Image (cartoon, rainbow, N blue to C red):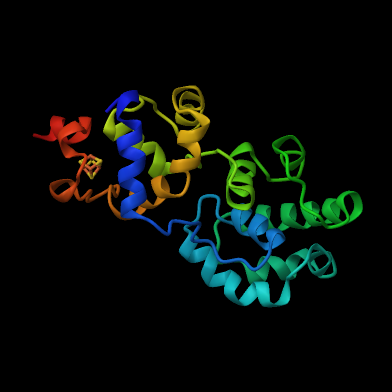
Amino acid sequence: MNKKDIPFFAETLNKMFPDAKTELYYNNEFQLLIAILMSAQTTDKQVNKVNKIFFEKFKIPEDWIKIWVEKIKNYIKSISFFNNKSENIVKTCKILVSEYNCIIPKTIEELIKLPWVWIKTAKVFLAVTLDAPYIWVDTHVHRVLNRLGFVKTKTPLETDKKISNYFTKQDHSKLHNTLVLFGRYHCTARKPKCETCVFKEKCKYFKNKK
Ligand code: SF4
């Protein structure tokens, strides 16, 4: 697949996942940011399992800074890197309280100044809250775009850089939710559903497999 196939690709994914949205559980923007932070190197499913209970108690930044970090660690210990995540989440909450009056900033530049918030995190947050034109290049998206032949890259970071010039802003808007779901449920890492895939005739991976 190449650039000229992008409209067909985006339109097809839209039909496959008409109600696509983030699968992370949250009740407000603050909880969304925390859920995205927690989801690094962990599945959304695992994060949701913890947060469906945890977010009942922790709704706003002040809730987090009132309790001991050790207690937070204990709550989220089933999530990878829970030590680092707990400490950095508390630091982030302190900054949100002291510098932003608990209102989450809405620019990449401000968001990435918060501890443990990387560009990827900021882009996901803005894509979900403002429908900003960013694609969340996680391992699924990286795999799909390489298999189809849109990019030839070794890491999600490299893919992210490549597509920022390759795909237009409009493409990013159309693809940011559907692409993740396509990688998660259709073009899966171990058993991609190639035989029933509408893209198979144009897919580099499928052609090589044949
Ligand atoms: S043909 Fe297979 S590898 Fe290619 S996009 Fe479809 S599911 Fe993925």
Quarter of the figure with residue 199: top left
In the rendered image, residue 88, in percent from the top left (x then y), is placed at: 73, 52
The foreground one among 124 and 52 is 124
In the rendered image, residue 65, in percent from the top left (x then y), is placed at: 83, 64
In the rendered image, residue 16, in percent from the top left (x then y), is placed at: 31, 53
Quarter of the figure with residue 101: bottom right
Q: Residue furthest left?
A: 210
Against 159, residue 105 (above or below) is below
Relative to residue 167, is residue 2 drawn left or right?
Answer: left
Against 5, residue 143 (above or below) is below
Pick the quarter of the image with the N terminus: top left
The foreground one among 173 and 33 is 173
Q: Total number of numbered labels?
A: 0
Quarter of the figure with residue 31: bottom right
Q: For ligand 1, which image quadrant applies? A: top left
Against 173, residue 80 (above or below) is below
Residue at the spot x=27%, y=33% of the render?
Answer: 148
Residue at the spot x=73%, y=45% of the render?
Answer: 106
Relative to residue 61, is residue 164 drawn left or right?
Answer: left
Residue at the spot x=66%, y=55% of the render?
Answer: 33
Relative to residue 2, is residue 24 drawn left or right?
Answer: right
Relative to residue 42, is residue 56 drawn left or right?
Answer: right
Against 98, residue 4 (above or below) is above
The foreground one among 130 and 206 is 130
Pick the quarter of the image with the C terminus: top left
